[in-house]
């Protein structure tokens, strides 16, 4: 797969390689979607979080951006985690008496979604007419053609670039050119630690690129916010992006807390007044000229409805009036947009969202990409096209991008821009070294394995615990119980119910040792993590239905490793599931996932796993030995 073309430079060859690998992933995912649509039953789609069925239609309305919104609420299987999120394409369907599905012939997009409610942007009033009265109604995630096309366009632009700033950045980021720096007098930040302060200064000195490498608990977001805040003393406006909506929300919220005016392009993943206050939509409708624009749009819709009924001269008059109203509406939209962008110091969006029509032709002196280690390289280039300088933050020893095509992953599609720069241009990287989350005993193993032993525990967390004389990290070896894993399907992978039951018993015992009253008073929280969805769903159901856990339910989170990225808990239990004679451990081979799982715990970590099965792998064998030394 490593095809070289002599007419290209080293960096151009890399972009060609990215195009080939992305094409493989695109074809694989498209084929997989087609297979699921044609062969997978509704029940399985619902269980996999790809579909809501049935849904109850709620209200429909035009939002402040003049988009037709259709709201639905799911009626069944509300405990199942779903994969719907802002911007994703969806399709509607209904089912006849024989069980046959009929798909509606239009694609819509998610405008907002929470656990059980979804607001969907419809393409036209005709789509709403089609949906009216359809029963039972379902909604399903559609293949995301747009995101792929945006990535392909970005790679083509990068490859074509010859004498532009984009061509220079391509040579610096993935080619042979070295990043440059400017001389500035170091800025002091007494509220940051020395490695955080050094990272901010490296960002300020960088002419081309800098990387803030933030291992778990080291205050990456704090450092990045400080770097953005300080950059805004030198530049009027910057672009801030991340792979996911949740990550964009998180960094935006921290910037708003610092008093920075943020304009958030796209809808937030969580809805509250604080989050909504910096969205483009809310700021648009709060503009003084919006009421006039709303009235004009309403008049246009009314005239459009009457146009079909009048005689020729009436229709001509209405068309003339509509034309004048549309011109005035366009004037007002331009005025409002110019005001909003002039006021904003930070424009924030997902990487794909940076291709939004509102940002057409916009250029920014600096682009900050948070969680850059979870973004495909092609997605990063979408935003880099709009920037003169790039700052990446993240940790390539934690969760990688999601790749569905095994061959593309093996050939390097999962290797991110951040990882390439960190490996090839180490002078551009700042490693944050003081962590504020974990007890030192929990921290030391991942520090040695993933970070060359460079991490230090801050004094305030070094020996922090819940119980006196407690052991901070414990491995419960399930091999002596002869538990067996079961295979439950491609997506869910494996389950080990006996191990899950033992975990819950261990959790009960630990809650009893601490004391229920103390847990509630001090809000001591618990995380239960498993790499396998089936194990997570089994554990979640047991916690939800078990009477013992009722008083503590809001303090207990059960999730996959991916679901825990960026989170932390006082106490963490991990169920590794795998137990077989062959020593097969599947995607537990992806050690970055284990790094994330282990480093969620602040004060107590309990790992349940078959030591014989897992001990055949060097990482788990070393971890078992390390934990054995602590007992």
Image (tube, rainbow, N blue to C red):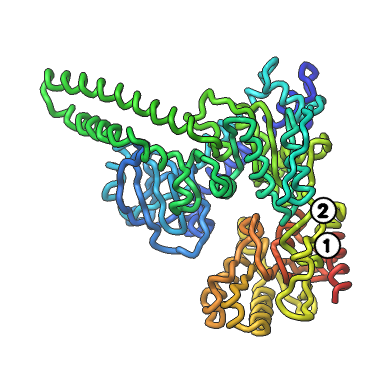
Left or right of residue 250: residue 305:
left
Residue depicted at 34% across the width and 40% down the height: 68
Q: Nearer the viewer, residue 298 or 160?
A: 298
Q: Secondary structure at mark 1?
A: helix
Residue depicted at 86% across the width and 57% down the height: 448
The image shows residue 407, relative to residue 41, as above or below, that is above
Q: Position of residue 335 (x, y in %)?
A: 39, 27
Q: Position of residue 278 (x, y in %)?
A: 47, 43
Quadrant of the frame with the C terminus: bottom right
Residue 100 in view here: yes
Mark 1 → mark 2, Cα distance in angstroms: 10 Å
Q: Nearer the viewer, residue 313 or 437?
A: 437
Q: Position of residue 532 (x, y in %)?
A: 65, 62
Q: Which residue is mark 2?
A: 450
Left or right of residue 324: residue 142:
right
Q: Earlier in the sequence, mark 1 or mark 2?
A: 1
Residue 403 in view here: no
Quadrant of the frame with the N terminus: top right
> Which corner quadrant of the image does residue 534 belong to?
bottom right
Mark nearest the camera among 1 and 2 is 1
Left or right of residue 357: residue 603:
right
The image shows residue 484, relative to residue 83, as above or below, that is below
Neighbourhood count class around disc 2 (C-alpha, 10 Å): few under 14, some 14–19, many 20 upward: some
The label number, if any, that marks residue 444 in the structure image: 1
Left or right of residue 593: residue 524:
left
> Which corner quadrant of the image does residue 612 belong to?
bottom right
Residue depicted at 79% across the width and 31% down the height: 2
């Amino acid at each position: 797969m490593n095809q070289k073309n002599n007419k290209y430079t080293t960096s151009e060859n890399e972009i060609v390689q990215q195009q080939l690998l992305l094409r493989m992933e695109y074809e694989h995912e498209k084929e997989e979607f087609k297979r699921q649509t044609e062969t997978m039953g509704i029940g399985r789609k619902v269980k996999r979080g790809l579909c809501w069925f049935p849904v109850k239609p709620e209200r429909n309305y035009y939002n402040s951006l003049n988009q037709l919104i259709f709201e639905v609420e799911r009626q069944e299987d509300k405990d199942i985690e779903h994969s719907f999120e802002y911007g994703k394409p969806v399709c509607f369907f209904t089912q006849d008496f024989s069980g046959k599905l009929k798909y509606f012939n239009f694609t819509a997009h998610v405008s907002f979604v929470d656990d059980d409610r979804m607001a969907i942007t419809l393409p036209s009033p005709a789509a709403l007419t089609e949906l009216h009265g359809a029963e039972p109604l379902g909604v399903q995630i559609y293949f995301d053609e747009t995101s792929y096309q945006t990535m392909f366009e970005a790679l083509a632009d990068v490859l074509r670039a010859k004498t532009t700033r984009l061509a220079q950045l391509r040579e610096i980021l993935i080619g042979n050119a070295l990043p440059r720096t400017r001389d500035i007098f170091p800025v002091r930040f007494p509220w940051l630690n020395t490695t955080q302060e050094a990272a901010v200064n490296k960002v300020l000195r960088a002419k081309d690129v800098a990387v803030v490498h933030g291992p778990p608990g080291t205050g990456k977001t704090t450092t990045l916010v400080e770097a953005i805040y300080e950059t805004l003393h030198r530049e009027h406006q910057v672009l801030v992006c991340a792979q996911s909506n949740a990550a964009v929300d998180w960094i935006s919220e921290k910037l708003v807390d610092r008093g920075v005016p943020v304009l958030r392009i796209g809808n937030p993943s969580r809805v509250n007044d604080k989050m909504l206050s910096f969205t483009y939509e809310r700021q648009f409708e709060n503009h003084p000229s919006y009421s006039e624009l709303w009235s004009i749009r309403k008049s246009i819709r009314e005239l459009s409805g009457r146009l079909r009924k009048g005689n020729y001269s009436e229709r001509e008059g209405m068309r003339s009036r509509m034309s004048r109203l549309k011109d005035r509406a366009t004037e007002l939209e331009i005025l409002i947009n110019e005001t909003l962008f002039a006021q904003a110091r930070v424009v924030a969006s997902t990487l794909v969202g940076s291709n939004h029509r509102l940002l057409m032709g916009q250029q920014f002196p600096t682009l900050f990409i948070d969680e850059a280690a979870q973004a495909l390289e092609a997605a990063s280039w979408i935003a880099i096209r709009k920037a003169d300088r790039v700052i990446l933050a993240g940790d390539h020893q934690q969760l990688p991008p999601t790749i569905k095509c095994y061959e593309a992953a093996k050939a390097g599609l999962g290797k991110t821009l951040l990882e390439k720069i960190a490996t090839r241009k180490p002078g551009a990287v700042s490693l944050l070294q003081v962590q504020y989350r974990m007890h030192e005993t929990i921290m030391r193993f991942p520090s040695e394995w993933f970070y060359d032993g460079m991490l230090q525990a801050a004094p305030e967390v070094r020996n922090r615990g819940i119980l006196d004389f407690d052991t901070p990290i414990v491995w419960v070896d399930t091999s002596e119980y002869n538990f067996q894993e079961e295979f439950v399907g491609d997506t869910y992978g494996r389950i080990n119910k006996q191990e899950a039951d033992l975990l819950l018993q261990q959790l009960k015992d630990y809650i009893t040792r601490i004391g229920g009253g103390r847990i509630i008073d001090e809000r001591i929280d618990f995380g239960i993590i498993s790499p396998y969805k089936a194990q997570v769903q089994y554990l979640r159901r047991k916690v939800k239905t078990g009477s013992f856990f009722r008083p503590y339910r809001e303090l207990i989170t059960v999730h996959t490793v991916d679901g825990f990225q960026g989170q932390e808990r006082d106490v963490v239990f991990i169920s590794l599931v795998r137990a077989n004679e062959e020593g097969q451990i599947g995607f537990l081979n992806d050690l970055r996932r284990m790094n994330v799982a282990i480093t969620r715990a602040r004060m107590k970590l309990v790992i349940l796993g078959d030591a014989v099965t897992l001990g055949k792998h060097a990482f788990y064998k070393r971890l078992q030995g390390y934990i054995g030394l602590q007992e």
